Image (spheres, rainbow, N blue to C red):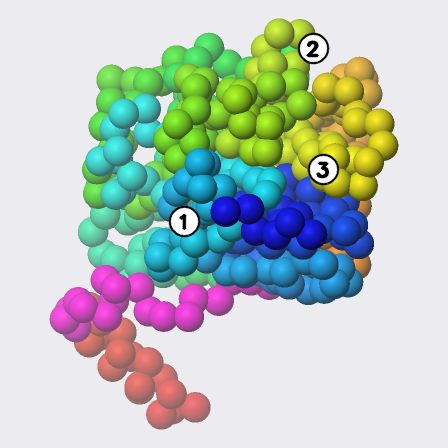
């Protein structure tokens, strides 16, 4: 049953870049909008790696969806997880059994990581997609140094201070560079037994070069800058296995505390819900107006969609694509509901792409200009500040970045619970000795 004969209802699945922008364009229109997300926040994923490496706090890069859409009386926000769509009945099915009627549906549920058919690796490798993922990585990373500080076995210390990043795209490069900097600057001053600056950071890329979407010259620059930071860059290194103690990669075994998976993404499973044709990455193939073939009332946008660009290649899974598609579908629906000339097919305006390498270097292709080094880093910083969702986030991120830039300090380094290893381990003789020393030292003060 259609939701209403008087005021149409648009259900938007996902409050990411695509969903929030579609909703904002529909704000104030004669339509009831329901935004459904399994979390209660909109997340700025491009800066997730900074939460994972203790540079920023979660609240700096995320905002409550309700607060973002508070100004629009016709928009309702629901926290819930979609598990299916009954397209004939025009209903969305939620995990708790609830069903939501719609007249128009916008699917913007994003993507997840793909382990290329090795889902068992997901048990041991960390991915970076949500705030929980970032906090887990931060906790594992900081705990590894804490554990190494108390460890007496040299081989185990080496393992605890080895971090393997798999995938040489922008996310892998940003993570590897930032972990190297964290260990060589901030942490290097804080430990007494271990030398954090001797941490072994390995970036593995199966292809011939890292940052393959950039020019070969920019890739070489990126690799050189990473090496200068102390990252071991390994290209042509295919992963064969990932387990609890490390990876088999490029014919070598690397014992590691942490394996970070930044290779390959796959669209979330909307294609199955919609019984739609999907691309290789699982993205729903859509028509040039982002609608589903044969279902003009259903639109699929952002990472979960697959649409070819002007060059005949599928549009990349990037925030600006999702954002522009969200605005486009919002406008299209407004004209369908309010009347007026419908916009032509969706056209992506490509302003470029960027990747940051450590504290003050980046590569960028902006408005057709190729940039690298400090100028690219400055452009990256300004653009990301502007793109953050609200003024409060911009201000706190700006203050945190400035502080970190001048002092190498990182404010978000708190571990809220002891690493499991410390909790469960019985006190060892060397611990008793150091405890005794500490007690005696304290008593003589
Ligand atoms: C670590 C990282 C770094 C990145 N860096 C960059 C960058 O520098 N530049 C760039 O342009 N792009 C970057 N991207 C890609 C960019 O973030 C995505 O392309 C963009 O977020 C896609 O927007 P979207 O709206 O399609 O999906 P998302 O922004 O992922 O939003 C999807 C939303 O749907 C919700 N959801 C998912 N499944 C369900 C469900 N079943 N029910 C209810 N809700 C659901 C999720 O909670 C989420 O809020 C990065 C991505 C990652 C992970």
Occupied quadrant, residue 286: top right
The residue carrying mark 2 is: 310
Q: Vertical placement of 435 versus 229: above or below?
A: below
In percent of width and height, residue 408 lies at 64, 53
The residue carrying mark 3 is: 333
Q: Is mark 2 within 8 Å of ligand 1?
A: no
**Is residue 100 shown left or right of residue 159?**
right
The structure residue drawn at horizontal position 43% and vertical position 24%, both measured from the top left corner, is 276
Q: Between 27 and 164, which is closer to the camera in this rendering?
A: 27
Residue 89, magenta (yes or no): no
Give how far apart the Cα atoms at labels 2 and 3 are.
23 Å
Give how far apart the Cα atoms at labels 3 and 1 are.
22 Å
Tell me which secondary structure the magenta stretch mostly adopts: loop
Q: Which residues are magenta?
A: 403-428
Q: Vertical placement of 308 versus 283: above or below?
A: above
The residue carrying mark 1 is: 93
């Amino acid at each position: 049953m259609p939701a209403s004969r008087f005021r149409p209802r648009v259900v938007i699945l996902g409050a990411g870049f695509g969903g929030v922008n579609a909703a904002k364009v529909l704000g104030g229109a004669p339509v009831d909008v329901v935004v459904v997300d399994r979390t209660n926040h909109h997340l700025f994923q491009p800066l997730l790696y900074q939460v994972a490496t203790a540079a920023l706090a979660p609240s700096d890069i995320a905002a409550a969806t309700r607060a973002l859409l508070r100004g629009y009386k016709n928009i309702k926000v629901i926290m819930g997880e979609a598990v299916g769509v009954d397209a004939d009945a025009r209903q969305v099915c939620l995990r708790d059994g609830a069903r939501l009627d719609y007249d128009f549906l916008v699917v913007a549920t994003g993507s997840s990581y793909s382990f290329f058919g090795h889902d068992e690796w997901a048990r041991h490798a960390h991915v970076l997609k949500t705030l929980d993922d970032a906090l887990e990585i931060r906790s594992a990373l900081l705990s590894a140094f804490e554990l190494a500080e108390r460890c007496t076995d040299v081989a185990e210390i080496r393992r605890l201070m080895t971090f393997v990043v798999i995938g040489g795209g922008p996310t892998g490069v940003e993570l590897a560079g930032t972990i190297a900097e964290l260990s060589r600057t901030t942490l290097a001053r804080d430990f007494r037994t271990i030398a954090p600056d001797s941490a072994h950071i390995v970036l593995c890329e199966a292809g011939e070069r890292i940052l393959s979407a950039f020019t070969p010259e920019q890739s070489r620059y990126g690799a050189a800058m990473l090496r200068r930071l102390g990252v071991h860059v390994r290209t042509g290194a295919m992963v064969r296995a990932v387990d609890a103690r490390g990876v088999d990669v490029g014919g070598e075994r690397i014992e590691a505390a942490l394996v970070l998976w930044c290779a390959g993404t796959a669209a979330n499973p909307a294609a199955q819900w919609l019984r739609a044709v999907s691309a290789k990455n699982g993205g729903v193939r859509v028509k040039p107006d982002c609608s589903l073939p044969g279902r003009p009332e259903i639109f699929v946008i952002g990472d979960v969609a697959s649409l070819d660009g002007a060059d005949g290649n599928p549009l990349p899974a990037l925030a600006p694509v999702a954002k522009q598609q969200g605005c486009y579908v919002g406008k299209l629906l407004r004209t369908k509901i309010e009347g007026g000339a419908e916009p032509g097919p969706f056209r992506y305006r490509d302003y470029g792409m960027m990747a940051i390498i450590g504290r003050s270097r980046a590569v960028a292709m902006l408005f057709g200009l190729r940039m690298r080094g400090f100028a690219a880093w400055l452009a990256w910083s300004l653009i990301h500040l502007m793109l953050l969702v609200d003024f409060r986030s911009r201000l706190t991120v700006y203050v945190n970045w400035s502080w970190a830039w001048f002092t190498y300090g990182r404010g978000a380094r708190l571990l809220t619970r002891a690493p499991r290893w410390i909790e469960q381990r019985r006190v060892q003789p060397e611990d008793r000795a150091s405890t005794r020393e500490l007690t005696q030292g304290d008593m003589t003060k």
